[in-house]
Image (cartoon, grey):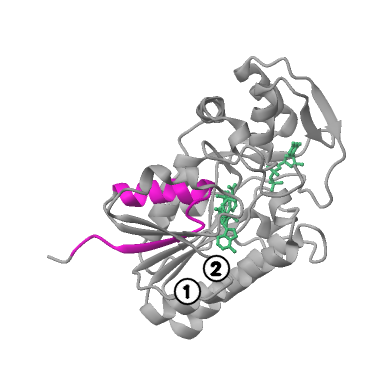
Amino acid sequence: MPSTCKRILVTGGAGFLGSHLCDRLVAQGHDVICLDNLFTSQKINITHLLGKPNFEFIRHDVTHPLWLEVDEIYNAACPAAPGHYQYNPIKTMKTSVMGAINILGMAKRCRAKVLQFSTSEVYGDPEVHPQPESYRGNVNPIGPRACYDEGKRAAETLFFDYYRQNKLNIRVVRIFNTYGPRMHPFDGRVVSNFIRQALENAPITIFGEGKQSRSFCYVSDLIEGINRMMDAPDDFIGPVNLGNPVEFTMLELAKTVIELTGSKSELVYKPMPADDPSQRQPDITLAMAKLNWKPTIELREGLLKTIEYFRSIDFKSFRAPTPNY
Ligand code: NAD
Ligand code: UDP
């Protein structure tokens, strides 16, 4: 009988999403290689895996070529929080584009199946709501978010060209805002910011009037969807939206976090960042039909688990990845 144990590479595997994916793949008995340059993460996310015989960590930057023999690749390496990807925008673009070229070249050589962690940011500030995969987006190509949005769009282009030109077995998932334990406490993203601020009884920073919306997916739901997409039949390559379609304003999120933490924090209003999308909600019809997938964890339940994690960590032991925080 052929072995069901696969050799799997996870780039960005020490990050928030990547480390949860590594947990799952290691538990499934696969031979997992986690590759990361630790730009926006710390080894603490994977220390519990380091002693396992079917897990290894490689510190490497995906903008440099790599040479490994694997059956599957999950390409998650890229700074994802606005403050992180805007810190060195040229490097962010290089990570998406040169990273994709290196990963796809390697996949072509060893005939590995390769899944790209794309993003709802490919839709920019969307004029179509909710966003189906067929929507081509509204991205400002020269704005401060472009290094990430356009880098991820170019990576999708490369994936589809390797599929058409080299018959590579690809998958593309477009991930909408996901949160949960192991988010970096100083990543500046809204869920981590609000929870950290609430636990410290510090002012909660609302950008703009807080009327902009996002749809928040709990990490375990997302990892389930990503794993299903990798295992989907070869005639379904995506792109497919993965996210929780229940939409909240930032003001609603702040009030819920204050209630769940019992915080004394007050709200303070800060200027709205440039090109900040005013609304975002995934249309997940395709994921439901093709992957039989939909999120199961409601926001309050997911926030309670995330708050519990943030209570358990010592913020002082986390190094802010960029000087912006
Ligand atoms: P994260 O910052 O925790 O993880 C990204 C990981 O990639 C980090 O460990 C970082 O050190 C690593 N990395 C960055 N540049 C690298 C490079 N040049 N070489 C090697 N490693 C590098 O963020 P995350 O939320 O876990 O995001 C993971 C992936 O999912 C990213 O590709 C991101 O674009 C995508 N994504 C995430 C979300 C979300 O809401 N969390 C939404 C859409 C897309
Ligand atoms: N945001 C906010 N206060 C914060 C951090 C973020 O009001 O302290 C807002 C931000 O302007 C955006 C939303 O929350 O409208 C989500 O921001 P995040 O950086 O988490 O993700 P993204 O903008 O990439 O969806």
Quadrant holding the C terminus: top right
The correct choice, above or below, for 137 with respect to 282 in the image is: below
Mark 1 C-beta to ligand 1 under 8 Å: no
19 or 36: which is nearer to us?
Answer: 36
Quadrant holding the N terminus: bottom left
* Quarter of the rendering containing residue 148: bottom right
Which span of residues is magenta-colored?
Answer: 3-27
Which x, y percent locates residue 162? 50, 79
* Quarter of the rendering containing residue 299: top right
| 250 displayed left or right of 115 | right
| 208 displayed left or right of 247 | right
Cα distance between the residues tagged 1 and 2: 7 Å
Q: Which residue is mark 1?
A: 66
Q: Residue at x 64, y 28 (%)?
A: 195
Q: Which residue is mark 2?
A: 62
Which x, y percent locates residue 202? 75, 23
The kind of secondary structure element at disc 1 is loop
Which x, y percent locates residue 107? 43, 75
Residue extending farthest to the right is 271
Task: Tell me if residue 210 can be seen.
Answer: no
The correct choice, above or below, for 306 with respect to 70 in the image is: above
20 or 207: which is nearer to us?
Answer: 20
